[in-house]
Amino acid sequence: MINLEKRNIFVTGATGGIGGSIIETLNQNGANIIASGTNEEKLNTIKSKYKNIKTINFNISNHKKIDSLVEEVSDSFNGKIDGLINNAGINNDNLSLRMSLDEWQKVIDINLTSTFLLSKFFIKKMLKNKCGKIVNITSIVGHTGNIGQSNYAASKSGIIGMSKSLALEYAKKNIT
């Protein structure tokens, strides 16, 4: 197992199945965790199950407040951010000819734009600490496409390309 003691990690989408597994594994390995999601009931379950994990109810589609979320997380960790796990995401399936612009935009905004903004603002914090790790959760659909998921596939393949670009930009600064 990996020793993550004294590592400060922020996880989005913590109230879903993958998010729950992520925070359980991080917790078992000693990380300090702030978990975010939008399901208050599930956030309360996380708080009662893991007394040491702080939770934040935050809708990452609220792009204008992402920078203040990052400040709140940074303050909670006394300015030291070791990791960001961009796990939050949605799908809103429909055949492309039937897909409304709103169906398209909502998936792109939550899955791709929010991942970009969170990465951008956390990278600024990580640069001050001279290190950091970002994990962006995608899907095989980002590589293969899928019937009725043109919006989801576009968002997930966008995250893959963005992650590669961010890695090239910041690896030399010890942010991977």
Image: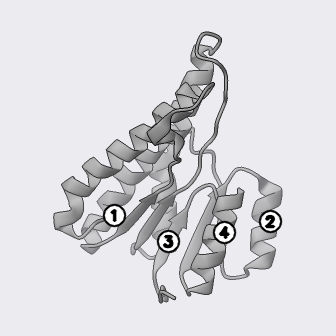
- Looking at the rendered structure, the kind of residue marked 3 is Ile
Task: Identify which amino acid the numbered label 4 is placed on.
Answer: Ser
Q: Rate crowding at label 3 as few (under 14), some (14 to 19) or many (20 or more) other CA atoms within 10 Å.
A: many
The CA distance from mark 3 to mark 1 is: 12 Å
Query: Along the line of sight, which residue is nearer the eye, 174 or 51?
Result: 174
Gap in angstroms between the C-alphas marked 1 and 4: 26 Å
The quarter of the displayed image where residue 146 is located: top right
Circle 1 — which element? helix
Q: Earlier in the sequence, mark 2 or mark 3?
A: 3
Q: Could you tell me how far apart the alpha carbons at marks 4 and 3 are, in whole angstroms?
A: 14 Å
Give the number of the disc on residue 44.
2
Badge 1 or badge 4: first in the primary sequence: 4
- Badge 4 element: helix
Q: Earlier in the sequence, mark 2 or mark 1?
A: 2
Q: Label 3 belongs to which residue?
A: 9
- Residue for badge 1: 125
Return the residue nearer the eye: 122 or 167: 167
On screen, residue 121 versus residue 31, left or right, reads left
Which residue lies at the image location 62% right of the left edge and 85% below the top edge?
28
User: Measured along the vertical axis of the image, is residue 130 above or below residue 43?
Assistant: below
Q: CA distance from mark 2 to mark 1?
A: 28 Å
The mark closer to the camera, 4 or 3, is 4
Q: Quick check: marks 2 and 4 in contact, CB under 8 Å?
A: no
Dot 4 corresponds to which residue? 21
Q: Residue at x 49, y 61 (%)?
A: 85
Q: Give the amino acid at mark 1.
A: Lys
